[in-house]
Image (cartoon, helix red, strand yellow):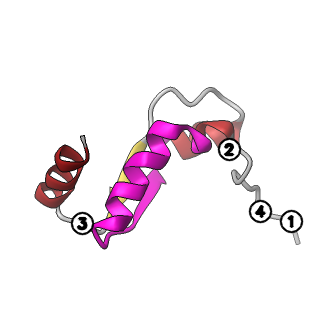
Amino acid sequence: MNELPSLADAQWLKAASLQRVMSVIARAGGEARVAGGAVRNALMGEAVTEVDLATTLQPERVMEVCIAAG
């Protein structure tokens, strides 16, 4: 069986700005995951130029907590 690829060591995932947004969402009781083209590009070895997040919070709540966090 083939081993699934891992993005655990991807530098773009460790970016302070991305980690901050994910942390703000987590502190508000939500969960955020990277979705879409960033995952595809990283797995294909291409540059990640933008990151989309899927979250368990409603859009209005995400905006509220992000604005409050500055």
Position of 6 relative to 9 (above/below): below
Residue designated by label 4: 4
Position of 52 relative to 54 (above/below): above
Q: Are marks 1 and 4 in contact (CB under 8 Å)?
A: yes
Instruction: Report the amino acid beneath label 1.
Output: Asn
Q: Quadrant of residue 28?
A: bottom left
Residue designated by label 3: 57
Does the image show residue 36? no
What residue lies at 34% left-to-right and 56% top-to-bottom?
A: 24
**Residue at mark 3 to residue at mark 1: CA–CA distance:** 34 Å
Position of 48 relative to 60 (above/below): above
**Residue at mark 2 to residue at mark 1: CA–CA distance:** 15 Å
Q: Earlier in the sequence, mark 3 or mark 1?
A: 1
Main SS category, magenta section: helix
Q: Are marks 2 and 1 in contact (CB under 8 Å)?
A: no
Closer-to-camera residue (50/69): 69
Q: Earlier in the sequence, mark 2 or mark 1?
A: 1
Is residue 15 inside the magenta stretch? Answer: yes
Does the image show residue 50? yes
**Residue at mark 1 to residue at mark 4: CA–CA distance:** 6 Å
- Lateral position of residue 13 relative to residue 30, left or right: right
- Lateral position of residue 28 relative to residue 12, left or right: left
- Lateral position of residue 65 relative to residue 17, left or right: left
Q: Secondary structure at mark 2?
A: helix
Residue designated by label 1: 2
Q: Are marks 3 and 1 in contact (CB under 8 Å)?
A: no
Q: Which residues are magenta?
A: 13-37
What residue lies at 70% left-to-right and 54% top-to-bottom?
A: 8
- Please name which of the two marks, 1 or 4, marks the residue nearer to the observer: 4
Q: Quadrant of residue 43?
A: top right
Residue designated by label 2: 43
